[in-house]
Image (cartoon, helix red, strand yellow):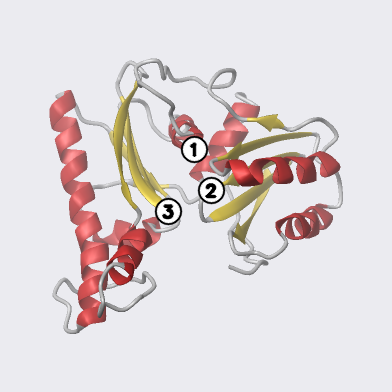
Amino acid sequence: MDLAVSIGNTTIRIGAVHHQNGKVWEIGRNAQDIAGEMSNIFALLKEPAERSILASVRPDLTNGVYHVMCSFCRTEPIIASLGNGFSLDYSYYRGQLGIDRAICCEAACLQAEPPFIVVDLGTATTLNVVDESKHFIGGLILPGVQMGLSALSDNTALLPHIQLESFGGTIGRDTKECLLSGAVHGTAMLLDKAIANIWSILESTGTSVITGGNASIILPIMETQCIYEKDLILKGLFSILNKENEALEWIPQQRLLQK
């Protein structure tokens, strides 16, 4: 069995694959005992992992999660970093690239031939661009959809704090609906325009792959045709762990843990 763990800013996602059968779990960042919750998940798997890989954008959580994985795995987990197992060229990017962005691009290679754009609608919203020569050439980073809603509430006296949800109409009829329309439709319009501009700049066209916790809300409003992959980063981790793996079919995640 192979194990992959992705520590994001909002959630920890855990994927386990055994004989091409996969399961996914999610732990919210507010879980009181992350180590205990992970141990409970590992207990469900009944046998240790032969191989494992960890990616993290939360340095404060990396060591603790790594040691929990060590207790369950037969071999020392790999901590993902740019290098071995990566198929794209990241040398064109100046500065430090977030490992989550790179892994999602690696996973997109399982879905489409370059050029492609990977849109990740998570805590932050990112667009990541790979050209036809398999060079990662950069992208955009902007506040996530829920982050934007929270910022409006936190920085104004009267706007309420609301949770992101689907909103079909464009014109809100009260403050909550106006906020939701701005978040949902505003993000969809921004992404449509940004993707179109990127293809214009590249004088090319290609595939758009979308992932992230907010993707299922934003994608239905977008005009751009996208491939939706809920567990793109986990697929990327397994691809790095074993470049011979075929694209995996995932069963729905099991929401066992508190948010």
- Amino acid type indicated by mark 2: Gly
Residue visible at 55% across and 18% down? 83
Q: Indicate which disc residue 193 carries.
A: none
Dividing the image into 4 quarters, which one contains the C terminus? bottom right
Q: Is residue 238 left or right of residue 111?
A: right
Instruction: Using the rendered image of the protein, determine whether residue 228 is visible from the camera's viewpoint.
Output: yes
Classify 38 as above or below 194. Answer: below
CA distance for labels 3 and 1: 12 Å
Residue 157, position as x, y percentages in the image: 26, 77
Q: Amino acid at mark 1?
A: Asp
**Spatial separation of the CA atoms under disc 1 and disc 2:** 8 Å
Q: Earlier in the sequence, mark 3 or mark 2?
A: 2
- Kindly state the secondary structure of the residue where label 1 is placed: helix
Q: Compared to 252, does 106 lie above or below? A: above
- Of callouts 3 and 1, which one flags the residue occurring earlier in the amino acid sequence? 1
Q: Kindly identify which residue carries mark 1.
A: 100
Q: Residue at x 36, y 71 (%)?
A: 165
Quarter of the figure with residue 150: bottom left
Tell whether 238 sits left or right of 139: right
| Proximity of marks 1 and 2: CB atoms separated by less than 8 Å | yes
Q: Label 2: which residue?
A: 8
Asked if labels 2 and 3 touch by Cβ distance under 8 angstroms, the answer is yes
Q: Amino acid at mark 3?
A: Thr
Q: Secondary structure at mark 3?
A: loop
Q: Is residue 241 left or right of residue 47?
A: left
Please provide percent x and percent y for residue 208. 31, 40
Asked if residue 222 can be seen in this view, the reply is no
Report x, y in % for residue 82.
Answer: 53, 23
Q: Residue placed farthest to the bottom in the image?
A: 174
Residue 123: mark: 3
